[in-house]
Image (cartoon, rainbow, N blue to C red):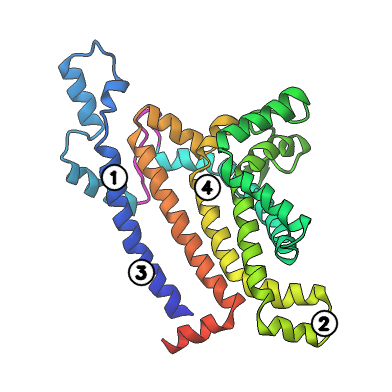
Amino acid sequence: MLTFILRRTSESFFVLLAMSLLVFVGVYAIGNPVDLLISPDATPEDIAQVTKALGLDLPLWQQYFYFLRQVLQGDLGRSFMFSTPAIDLLISKMPATMELAVAAMLIASVLGIPLGLIAGMNADNWMGKTIMSVSILGFSLPTFWVGLVLIMFFSVELGWLPSSGRGPTTVLFGIPISFLSWEGLKHLLLPALNLALFKLAMIIRLTRAGTQEALMQDYVRFARAKGLRPSRIIGVHVLKNIMIPIVTVIGLEFGSVIAFSIVTESIFAWPGMGKLLIDSINNLDRPVIVAYLCLIVVFFVIINLVVDLSYALLDPRVRIGDSVR
């Protein structure tokens, strides 16, 4: 197991290095933030002074190596707009995004796995067909439209839930969170539900397909022949054997929820990293954009490593295969 972790860590280092180069070149090749930071009436001398102060007068390759050196020192650059470290801006917004992402994936997992099991065990009757028909909506409806409909119905028409903002927060272990209060939960519910809809549909369909395949296996037929209870057959023999692909999808989709919650955060004015990214793109705040994308790559690498390690807990054959290699 230790060898596996070390190998994956070294592979992750090269992935981070390659992605940092692609992200840096892609972002720094677009536009000129100096045009947004100074007055249109500025003299050429003023433009040259601001350009030099931001380090934009250096060749691109020198800027990249300077960026790498700063990263190794724990510095991802300073925001052009706020004149503060980009990593500090992201960390200040990270709790809101993580809270939204965790809530969305909890909704998708807690509802998706049971509904997928029910749909798989009742594939030919009205219950299974209804669940699958409803799950199609999760794939078909665009996120921004669903968010607007949720606001119109639950906020405008019924007045049950707030339409924007994060609500009051409580500091827990130095991290501001909102789900510990009823008002905070009300602010969290709509954006989390909007973000969870697509993931919910995906988990339902994946669980249903795995359940149908597992029910046809010999070990399930043998368990039925032994007279085991249906709940034990589903919980031990079916669910445990279909969890590896489900865990994989949940892990990867958790990373995508963190990375692509931009639309939901914009619609519901959720003060997370996605909204900060939109503001940074509008202002060509390159250090914040690069720091955000690099941070997302780190999230994906860590999540993939955790998912791979969870395989060994769910399936002992993974450990055996690793030891043989």
Q: Spatial distance from mark 1 to mark 4, Cα to Cα?
A: 20 Å
Residue 208: in magenta span:
no
What amino acid is found at the position of numbered circle 4 in the picture?
Answer: Ile
Left or right: 151 in relation to 311 = right
- The image shows residue 4 at horizontal and vertical percentages of 44, 77
76 magenta-colored: yes
> Could you tell me how many numbered marks the image carries?
4
Given contact means CB atoms under 8 Å apart, are the residues at marks 2 and 3 in contact? no
Q: Is residue 93 left or right of residue 30?
A: right
Q: Which amino acid, by three-letter code, is at mark 2? A: Leu
Badge 1 vs badge 2, beta-carbon distance below 8 Å: no
Tell me how far mark 3 sits from mark 4, CA to CA: 24 Å
Nearest the camera: 243 or 174? 243
From the image, give the main secondary structure of the stretch colored magenta: loop
Q: Label 1 amino acid?
A: Phe
- The residue to which callout 2 is attached is 228
Quarter-wise, where is residue 14 in the image? bottom left
Q: Which mark is residue 24?
A: 1
Instruction: Give, as a three-letter code, the residue at label 3.
Output: Ser
Q: Earlier in the sequence, mark 4 or mark 2?
A: 2
What residue did someone put label 3 on? 10
Mark sitting earlier along the chain (1/3):
3
Q: Quadrant of the C terminus?
A: bottom left
**Label 4 to label 2: alpha-carbon separation:** 41 Å
Using a 10 Å C-alpha cutoff, classify the residue at mark 2 as few (fewer than 14 neighbours), some (14 to 19) or many (20 or more).
Answer: few
**What whole-number distance in Å separates the C-alpha atoms at marks 2 and 3?**
46 Å
Q: Mark 2 or mark 3: which comes first in sequence?
A: 3
Earlier along the polypeptide chain: callout 1 or callout 2?
1
Indicate which label's residue lies in the foreground, 1 or 2: 2
